[in-house]
Amino acid sequence: MPHLQQLYPGTAHVVPLGLDRADDNVAWEYAKANGFVICTKDADFQTRSFARGHPPKVVFLVSGNGPSREVLMLLTGHRDLLLQFDGDHSRSLLVLP
């Protein structure tokens, strides 16, 4: 997480927030209320994004169940794209391979 904090200040993981076992709706509402973008491998959030729009925005990772370092590489390697997506008020979903 320290690497992500440097690139994306304010980044938080669900575990320290107590949301790792929370219902998807609770996590969605928390992200919405606190200005977070949800970064997930859970297709339910992709579906929710289609149905509800944003906020919160959703970054859907379709890379499968790989180690955390793969997620870190995706998020660091696509930083410009992610920042562009965050600033685009017309888009609610970004899919990263």
Image (tube, rainbow, N blue to C red):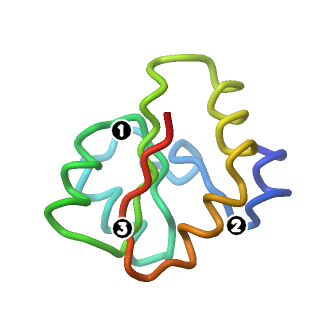
Callout 3 secondary element = loop
Label 1 vs label 2, nearer the camera? 2
Callout 1 secondary element = loop
The amino acid sitting under disc 2 is Gly
> Which quadrant of the structure image shows residue 90?
bottom left
Left/right placement of residue 36 relative to residue 47 reads right
Q: 82 or 23, which lies in front?
A: 82
Q: Residue at x 51, y 47 (%)?
A: 14
Which of the labelled discs sits on residue 92, or is there none? 3
Q: Residue at x 71, y 60 (%)?
A: 80
> Which residue is at the far bottom?
89
Q: 75 or 4, which lies in front?
A: 75
Q: Label 3: few (<14), some or many (≥20) within 10 Å?
A: many
Q: Residue 60, how many percent across, how many down?
A: 41, 44
Label 1 vs label 3, nearer the camera? 3
Mark sitting earlier along the chain (3/2):
2
Tags 1 and 2 touching, CB below 8 Å = no
Q: Residue at x 47, y 49 (%)?
A: 18
Label 3 vs label 2, nearer the camera? 3
Q: Residue 27, how many percent across, how many down?
A: 35, 56
Say which residue label 1 marks: 21
Q: CA distance from mark 1 to mark 3?
A: 24 Å
Say which residue label 2 marks: 10
